[in-house]
Image (tube, rainbow, N blue to C red):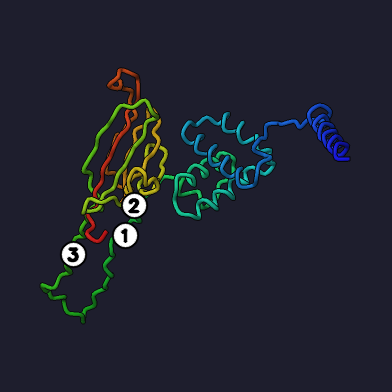
């Protein structure tokens, strides 16, 4: 009896394996981004946005985005920017803003990442003295020494000063790397740093890459462009000018591009 049960069990296992391996085997296929879990397309879009920002290669970015098979792709990218941007200024939000703008989905929240900061002043008309019509009964005005005193407006002192400016030749993509220190020499996070050039501007905030220091931030440069660096509330006033990713040779003799390391120090005593 036991032998019959054992034979039947082995026969059943053998038939099951034969069916699974020979008759109807499992076929494995490569999944694309459109079929993965909902949170992973967000990671895919951010990766595409950051790669597009670094390289400017739109055909490659478009090919990667088409893998999502999203008929409302522009709205998807715009909504993702809103969620990422709600966490505060960060490189991913900047990359998503550029990608959404390329897809024609620019929103008001993206403007700060896409436009140049402009400082404007409204001209003030000089005061006009009232016209008085003298009469015969009116005595001639007597000059006095009481003239209005004009107090010159003092130019506010700068928030930051440049304490270091050095270039290095690297084979990596060229960058402007800014480190901001407080008066005591510690890294200063949360400082707005504006990178401007003729026809454009971009911004980053220090402290978003703590592995490089709490006061660190960086920006990817393009060849043949001259960049300026400003920081804080007076970011429209350039602290550093004429930064270019010029060609160079590394110490090993390999061709490279200049990366710039800028060190700023805050003059505020309460930071």
- Quarter-of-image position of residue 37: top right
Q: Are marks 2 and 3 in contact (CB under 8 Å)?
A: no
Rendering coords of residue 211 (x, y %): 36, 44
> Which class describes the residues within 10 Å of circle 1: few (<14), some (14-19), or many (20+)?
few
Q: Does residue 50 appear to the left or right of 229 in the view shown?
A: right
Q: Is residue 26 above or below residue 132?
A: above
Q: In which quadrant will I find the C terminus?
A: bottom left
Disc with the residue nearer the chain's start (1 vs 2): 1
Q: Nearest to the eye among marks 3 and 1: give it.
A: 3
Q: Are circles 1 and 2 on residues that touch, CB within 8 Å?
A: no
Relative placement, left or right, of 50 versus 2 is left
Q: Secondary structure at mark 2?
A: loop
Measure the C-alpha gap from mark 3 to mark 1: 16 Å
**Mark 3 neighbour class, 10 Å CA radius: few under 14, some 14 to 19, many 20 or more:** few
Q: Nearer the viewer, residue 170 or 75?
A: 170
Residue 62, percent from left and from top: 60, 33
Whether residue 114 is visible, yes or no, is: no
User: Does residue 168 show up?
Assistant: yes
Give coordinates of residue 264: x percent, y percent: 26, 46
Frontmost residue, 12 versus 244: 12
Q: According to the image, label 2 marks what residue?
A: 189
Instruction: Determine whether 248 is above or below 208 in the image.
Output: above
Residue 213 x %, y %: 32, 46
- Residue drawn at x 57%, y 33% is 61
Please give the label number shown on residue 150. 3
Between 240 and 183, the one nearer to me in the picture = 183
């Amino acid at each position: 009896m036991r032998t019959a049960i054992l034979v039947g069990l082995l026969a059943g296992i053998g038939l099951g394996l034969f069916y699974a391996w020979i008759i109807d085997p499992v076929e494995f296929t490569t999944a694309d981004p459109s079929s993965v879990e909902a949170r992973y397309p967000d990671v895919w879009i951010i990766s595409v946005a950051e790669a597009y920002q670094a390289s400017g290669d739109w055909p490659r970015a478009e090919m990667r985005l088409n893998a999502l098979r999203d008929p409302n792709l522009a709205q998807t990218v715009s909504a993702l920017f809103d969620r990422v941007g709600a966490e505060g200024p960060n490189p991913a939000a900047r990359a998503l803003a550029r990608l959404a703008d390329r897809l024609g989905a620019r929103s008001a929240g993206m403007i700060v990442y896409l436009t140049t900061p402009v400082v404007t002043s409204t001209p003030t008309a000089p005061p006009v003295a009232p016209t008085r019509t003298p009469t015969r009964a009116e005595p001639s005005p007597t000059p006095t020494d009481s003239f209005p005193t004009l107090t010159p407006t003092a130019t506010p002192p700068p928030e930051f000063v440049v304490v270091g400016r050095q270039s290095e030749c690297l084979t990596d993509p060229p960058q402007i790397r800014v480190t901001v220190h407080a008066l005591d020499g510690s890294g200063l996070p949360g400082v707005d740093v504006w990178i401007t050039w003729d026809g454009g501007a971009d911004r980053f905030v220090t402290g978003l890459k703590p592995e490089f220091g709490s006061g660190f931030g960086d920006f990817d440069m393009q060849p043949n462009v001259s960049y300026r660096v400003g920081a804080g509330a007076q970011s429209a006033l350039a602290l550093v000018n004429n930064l270019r990713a010029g060609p160079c040779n590394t110490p090993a003799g390999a061709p490279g591009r200049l990366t710039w390391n800028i060190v700023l120090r805050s003059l505020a005593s309460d930071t």
